[in-house]
């Protein structure tokens, strides 16, 4: 099984755990416990969760770290990242505020990366911190894009 497919299996496991386990998850979608169990089992390399099942279950797993699990894994598999667009709509007056936040978030990325590079080596914990700052900036940019698209 490829690393990408293993990642999808792990993401399915996280999603099912986020819903409350196999029995709980089966109550919220069209497939039963055994199918969901196969979908998340690495010993069942040809069984993967269906998209409609992901659409039913993923919203219910929102409180588990890494949400949306399967969607994020698919984005990675396709060479991208998942960026959530914040709920709620900004107003035109909010664009200036969003622009100011964008400058701050960009500076946060820069300063965090510069700190990580201070000794010439970016350690894994430093990389995670920088990536967190980058994700905050991308989410803000996605919100700005959505607001501008609505104009």
Image (spheres, rainbow, N blue to C red):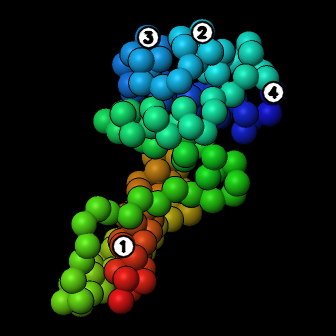
Distance between mark 2 and mark 3 Cα atoms: 9 Å
* Label 4 or label 3, whichever comes before in sequence order: 4
* Label 1 or label 4, whichever comes before in sequence order: 4
Distance between mark 2 and mark 1 Cα atoms: 39 Å
Give the left or right position of residue 113, taking residue 70 as reference. Answer: left
Disc 4: which residue: 1
Determine if residue 136 is in view: yes
Determine whether the residue tagged by mark 1 lies in a helix, strand or loop: helix
Task: Report the residue at 74% width, 15% height from top.
Answer: 44
* Label 2 or label 3, whichever comes before in sequence order: 3
Disc 3: which residue: 23
Mark 3 Cα-neighbour bin, 10 Å: few <14, some 14–19, many ≥20: some
Determine whether the residue tagged by mark 3 lies in a helix, strand or loop: helix
Mark 2 Cα-neighbour bin, 10 Å: few <14, some 14–19, many ≥20: few
Disc 1: which residue: 143
**In this view of the protein, which residue sits in the foreground, 112 or 49?**
49
Task: Report the residue at 37% width, 83% height from top.
Answer: 150
Determine whether 75 is above or below 120 in the image: above
- Using the image, tell me which numbered label, if any, was put on residue 34: 2
Residue 58 in picture, x, y percent from top left = 45, 37
Mark 4 Cα-neighbour bin, 10 Å: few <14, some 14–19, many ≥20: few
Which mark is in front, 2 or 1? 2
Which mark is in front, 2 or 4? 2
Residue 66 in picture, x, y percent from top left = 44, 40
**In this view of the protein, which residue sits in the foreground, 29 or 122?**
29
Say whether marks 2 and 1 touch (CB < 8 Å): no
Which mark is in front, 4 or 3? 3
Quarter occupied by the N terminus? top right
């Amino acid at each position: 099984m490829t690393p990408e497919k293993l990642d999808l299996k792990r993401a399915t496991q996280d999603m099912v755990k986020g819903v409350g386990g196999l029995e709980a998850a089966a109550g919220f979608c069209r497939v039963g416990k055994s199918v969901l169990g196969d979908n998340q089992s690495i010993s069942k390399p040809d069984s993967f969760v269906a998209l409609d099942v992901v659409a039913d279950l993923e919203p219910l797993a929102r409180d588990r770290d890494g949400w949306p699990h399967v969607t994020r894994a698919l984005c990675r598999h396709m060479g991208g990242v998942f960026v959530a667009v914040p709920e709620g709509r900004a107003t035109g007056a909010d664009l200036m505020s969003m622009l100011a936040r964008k400058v701050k978030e960009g500076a946060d990325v820069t300063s965090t990366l510069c700190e990580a590079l201070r000794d010439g080596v970016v350690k894994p914990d430093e990389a995670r911190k920088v990536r967190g700052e980058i994700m905050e900036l991308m989410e803000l940019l996605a919100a700005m894009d959505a607001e501008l698209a609505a104009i």
